[in-house]
Amino acid sequence: MSSRTIFLSRLIGLYCILIALSMMTRKQATLESVAAVLRDPSMMFVLGAMTLVAGLAMVLAHNIWSGGVLAVVVTLVSWMTLIKSLFFLFLPPELEAGLFLRQLHYQELFYVYGAISLALGVCLTYGGFKSRSH
């Protein structure tokens, strides 16, 4: 396993765990923050620009589609981050708010999304810390 895969799996995994735990312990504040950001064009631009940097960095550093489940999952998360940043930058705020809040039922499925993030984080973190680079 490459040292880059191990590093990114640890980084993404720990990020997912900490964000999921923070969100799940502060549900109302998280829902209010997400709704406010999605309705503010300037905040969407800033969020999109920061997410674009992270997505591009991960895709450029780790575009590996073979070499095991961990490598492929890191690559998929990298591409999803990049695509999400493009949504933030190019979709109108009303459309994004509708997509994230209504179409994806964010408020109703809040704990499901949190559990998915937590499970992904645990798997990536475990895989990253268990693996050894060559």
Image (tube, helix red, strand yellow):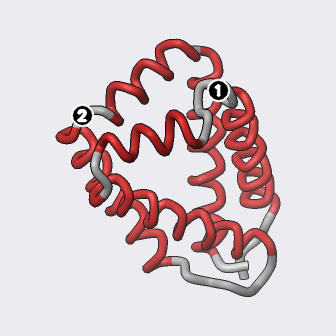
On screen, residue 25 versus residue 93, left or right, reads right
Image x and y of residue 51, in percent: 37, 55
Up/down of 27 relative to 75, above or below = above
Q: Residues within 10 Å of mark 1 (few under 14, many from 20)?
A: some
| Residue depicted at x 63% and y 16% | 25
Image x and y of residue 101, in percent: 50, 34
Name the amino acid, label 2. Asp
Mark 2 touching mark 1, by CB under 8 A? no
Near-viewer residue (77 or 124): 77
On screen, residue 71 versus residue 103, left or right, reads right
Label 2 vs 1, first from the N-terminus: 1
Q: Quadrant of residue 39?
A: top left
Q: Nearer the viewer, mark 2 or mark 1?
A: 2
Q: Which label is found at residue 64?
A: none
| Residue depicted at x 62% and y 69% | 76
Up/down of 39 relative to 63, above or below = above
Image x and y of residue 32, in percent: 43, 18
Name of the residue lying farthest toward the bottom: 66
On screen, residue 120 versus residue 37, left or right, reads right
| Residue depicted at x 38% and y 71% | 56
Helix, strand or loop under label 2: loop
Near-viewer residue (83 or 92): 92
Helix, strand or loop under label 1: helix
Name the amino acid, label 1. Leu
Image x and y of residue 9, in percent: 65, 60
Q: Quadrant of the N terminus?
A: bottom right
Q: Which residue is mark 2?
A: 40
Q: Which residue is mark 1?
A: 21
